[in-house]
Image: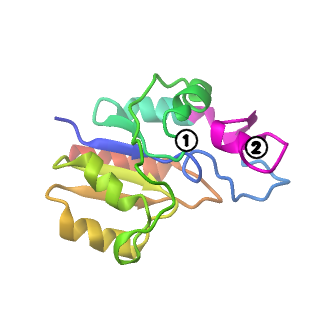
Amino acid sequence: MKPLLLIDVDGPLNPYAAKAQRRPQGYTTHRMRPTGWREAESAKPLRVWLNPAHGAQLLALADRYELVWATTWKDEANDWIGPQLGLPRLPFVDWPVMHGRAPRGTFWKTQYVLDYAGARPFAWVDDDITALDHEYVDQRHPARALLLRIDERIGLVGSDFALLADWAHA
């Protein structure tokens, strides 16, 4: 069975923290209104920067991984993000609670990532991973795991895709 590749949207695919007046090179601007954003106080659509090359790079990893959305966008990533990148509909982590309390100072997603992965190996790309998450996963997950923190100002880069390919191959 292939390892899972758990993919966050905001940070890895959408470098939301890049300077607002300067779209990152290779990215296109999209205006979106996912459910959570419609409930936000802003009347303006959410600005999302996506790099079309990321779709092909993720699809190239699909022979080594089962691709899964691990984002607060949940299934809406299939409606808003996937089509912009040329991705098929992907399974998603359906967080039981979002932004809630987490054990031992870990990121709130970490406990649910482990639940979702079960005993399977996984790689996880997210902008909120910390050393505490690495420690928590190392102590509790029975299989190999790669936690790859992505800079939310830059997003996924070529070396990240190379690392993911090498890790799955090992």
Q: Is residue 114 left or right of residue 162?
A: left
Q: Compare residues 15 and 105 and report the one nearer the observer.
A: 105
> Looking at numbered disc 1 in the image, what kind of residue is underneath it?
Trp
Can residue 13 be found in the magenta stretch? no
Q: Which mark is residue 47?
A: 2
Q: Position of residue 165 (x, y in %)?
A: 33, 44
* Residue 167 in view in this figure: no
**Residue at (76, 43) in percent of width and height:** 47
The residue beneath circle 1 is 73
Q: Compare residues 163 and 109 and report the one nearer the observer.
A: 109
Can residue 32 be found in the magenta stretch? yes
Secondary structure under the numbered disc 1 in the rendered image:
loop
**Residue at (72, 57) in percent of width and height:** 18
Magenta residues, start to end: 25-53
Query: Residue 93, relative to residue 55: is it above or below?
Result: below
Query: Residue 36, relative to residue 131: is it above or below?
Result: above
